[in-house]
Amino acid sequence: MGDAEIAFTRNGDIYHHQHRTVLGVAIKGHQFDLAPYNALNPDFGYPMTVCTNLWYAPQMRLVTNVKLPGGHVRLELANASGQFTVWYPDYHGGTYRKLLDTSSTRVKNLTMAYWKALMRRATNGTTAELPIYITSSAPGTVTLKFRYWNVIDDKLVEDEAVQCITSVRPPLRLDITRDGSIDDGDAAAWLSGRTFYYWMNEDKFTGDWINQGLNLTPNTWDFTVNGTFDLVNLFPVALDLSSFTNAWQGRVTYTIKPKWGAVNTFNYCFADVPWNKAGTIQTTNVMTTAGQSLSSASLTALPSEGYTLPYSFITSFSEDSGLMICEAKSEYVSLQVDIKLGEKVLYRYYAPMTILPVKQMYNWYNFRNYSGEARKRTSEHHVLYEEHNTKSLIFLHGANVNEDQAEVWGDVLFKRLWLSGMRADFYNVDWRSNIGDPANYQQNASNAFVVASQIVSTLTNSIPGEKVIMAHSLGNMVVSSMIQDYGLKVSKYLMCDSAVPSEAYYPANDVSIRVSQLVHPDWEEYPTNSWASNWHKLFANDLSDDRRKLGWPGRFSSVAQYAVNFYSTGDEVLELLDDNDIYVWTGITSGYVQYSWHHQELWKGRASANVLGGTTWSGWNIEENVLGVNKISVSEAQQMSPEDFKTNTVFYCYPSSMNSTNISLLVRAAHLTQGIPALTRPTGATRILFGISSYNNFNVDQTGDVLDDNNQNNSTFGIQRPNNWPTRTRWENRWLHSDMKDVSYFYNFKFYEKVIEKGGLR
C-alpha cells in the first residue's frame, strides 16, 4: 500500500513513466496485531472491557496512504448490539473529538481532502494513520468498517477493512456499591470512576467471639479462615469470563494473578454463592467448592505468577453460583486476569481495588492527653475520596478501655458498619476511661463530664456536615453531656448499652420513674427525702441555689429527642441483683463482673467497699457521731421535716462543695457520679418511656417484635439474631455488655443493619 513510479523500458532505455497509487486501507491495533483475534473467532474479534474513560479506552489505527487528490472515505459502525463511540485526538485543541457513535452518527462520509486534514490534526504532522479510541457504555458487539472509494477513468476503485469489536463486562467484578450484591450497579460504579475499598487482614482473633481464641500471628499466616469472627476479612470476587469461554473455548488460558506479579498478596478459595447474594459470605453458613464451611475453610496463597483456571472449572461458574473468596495480605495490591494464546497476552484486566490497613480507612481522635495520659497514637484523618459522604458517624467507647482496646473497638465497628452499607465518614474517638482500678466507675464517670467539656469544640468545628453520634456504655455519659451542656448538634444519637441512669433522660418532675429500685439496705427505713439522691428536691424552688441541680432526674432531658436506645435485658454488667443485699464479690466470676452497675450505685459513699468502686463522697454513707453511732436514727429522721434535712443531713455531706449554693457545672457532675446514687435502672438495661418512642427502643437481647395485649407493635422491639447465637458457659445465649464488639458479625449483623437504618446512614 502506497505510491510507486513504474518505468517502461526497451533495451534498457526508458520510454514512458507512470505514477501509480496502490490502494489499500487497514484497521490495525495499537502496538498489537489483530490477526490472532480474528483467527480465533472473527465474529468476536477484538475484546475490550466496557469503558467510557478515554484515558483507559483501547486504541486502534485507521491506516491509508492514498495520495490521489480525490476520492472518498466512508466510516461505519454496523451491526451494533451495544453502545459504542469512536473518538480521535485533536492535537491542536488538546482534547478528543467524536467521530462515530452507534446512537446518532453510525455512518460518516468524508472527502479525501478532509480525511487527510483529520490525520494531520490528530498527529500534528504528515501521516497515513488516524489514531482512534473506542469507548463503550454497555456490553455488546459492533463491526467497524473503513472504506476508500473513487472513480478513476470512469471506473469504481475501492478498498475496505472490517474489524469486529466486542465489549464485555469486567471479568473480575466486585461489590463496589457495598449493597451485598455484585451486579450491573457495580459495573456502573466502576464506569463512573469508583474504586472497591477493602482492608488487609491483620486480625489475630479466632472463633465466634473476641475472647474465644487468639493467634500469635496474623490470621493470613495459617491459610485458614479462623472462625466466624474472621469472615469480615474476606471479600467476594465474581469471575465473569463467559464471553471469552463462549468465543474462544479452551484454546486460550485464563489466569488470575496479583497485579504486576506482586508477592504476598492474597489467599483465596472458591464458593458456591450466587453473585446477587455475595454479601452473605459474612452472614450465612456458606460452603466452598471443596465442601468446607467457609468459616473454617482452607485457603491457598495466590502465587506471583498467578493461578491458571481449568477450563472446565471456569465454565461451571455463573451468576447463579460461583465466587472467588479472598483475604488481602498486603496493602495496595490488586487482582488481574490474563487471557493468553501461548505466551501472547490477548486480554488483560486490572480490578479497581484499593487495599489498605483498616486504620487508614477511618478517622481517629485521641483525647487521652486531655486527661493526663501520654498518647501512643495521635489523631489521624483519612478520607476515601470516592465516597463523597455528607454525613459523619462519631463513636465513643465505654469505661475501662485502654488505647490498644480503643483501636480494636474502632477497627471492629468500622468493618461491620462498612459491610452494612454505611455512607458516612467514621470517627473513632478515644478518651481516657480507664483511670485507676477497673471497678472505679465513679472516677471515670466524673472524668466523662470533664472530657465532654474538652472535646466538644473539636467535634463541632472539625467534623463537617451532618453528625450522627454513637456511644457504648460510659461513652454515653460523654455524649449526653456534650449535647445537653454544650449544645453539640446531632441529627441522631445511637445509645448502646448505656451506663447512664435512665432517670436522667426523663423530665425532672416526672415522678413516674422515681421508683426506688436501688436503695442500700441500711437506708430502707429512712424517709426518702433524707437520701442524698433526693436532697436536690428540697431546694427545687430556690433558683439561686445550685444544690437543686444535684440530682439525676432530668439531667439529660434534652437529649432524648435525638436518641435511639439499644439496650439488653441480658447485659451482665448493667444487670440488677434480685435484691439490694449485694456484697463485694457478688457476681465476680470467670473474668466477668456481673451486677457492676448495682455495685457502684449501692456502694457510693461506702468507702470500705472500694475494691468495687466504693467512694468517700456522700452517697449511702450515714454520718456518725463521736461514738460511731448514727448521728440521726431512723426514728429521729421519721420525725424531721424537709426543712430540717436541708441543714441536718442524715448522709455524710462530703465534700464541703456539696453544701454550697454556687456549684460549678463540673463540680456538680463530680458529685453526681461519685456521691449521688441513681435509684433507677441504667439506660442500657431498660426501655426509655419518655422522649424516645417505642420505635426507637430496641431490646437486643429479645429477638423479633414483642406484641402488647392488643396485638400492637408498641411494646418491646427486638432485633433478629440469626445463626444460633453462640452459647458461652453460664451466660447461655444472652447478649452481654460488649457483644456488639465481642461477638462476630455473623451473629449480630442485624444489629448493625438497624444502626444504619435508624441513624440514616445508608
Image (spheres, rainbow, N blue to C red):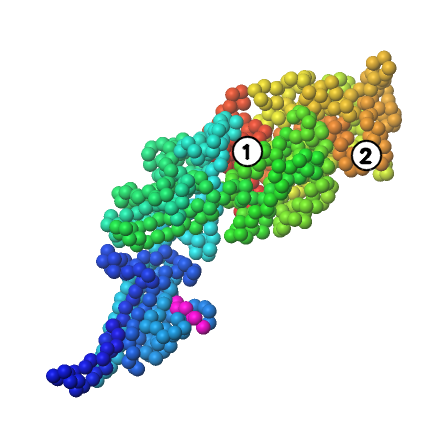
> Looking at the image, which is closer to me, 85 or 640?
85
Q: Nearer the viewer, mark 2 or mark 1?
A: 1
Q: Residue furthest front?
A: 12
What residue did someone put label 1 on? 741
Name the outermost residue toward the bottom: 15
* Image mark for residue 558: none
Residue 386: percent from left, percent from top: 51, 52
Q: Is residue 311 magenta?
A: no
Asked whether the viewer can see residue 114, the reply is yes
Give the image location of residue 735, x and y in percent.
55, 29
Q: Which residues are magenta?
A: 86-92
Q: Nearer the viewer, residue 682 or 201?
A: 201
The amino acid beneath tag 2 is: Arg
> Which quadrant, please, contains the N terminus?
bottom left
Based on the displayed image, in which of its 4 quarters is residue 102 positioned?
bottom left
| Left or right, 235 with reference to 3 | right
Q: Residue at x 57, y 47 (%)?
A: 382
What secondary structure is found at the residue carrying circle 1? helix
Residue 447: horizontal and vertical position, in percent?
Answer: 71, 34
Q: Residue furthest top?
A: 627
Q: Amino acid at mark 1?
A: Lys
Q: Earlier in the sequence, mark 2 or mark 1?
A: 2
Residue at x-position 78% and y-position 38%: 665
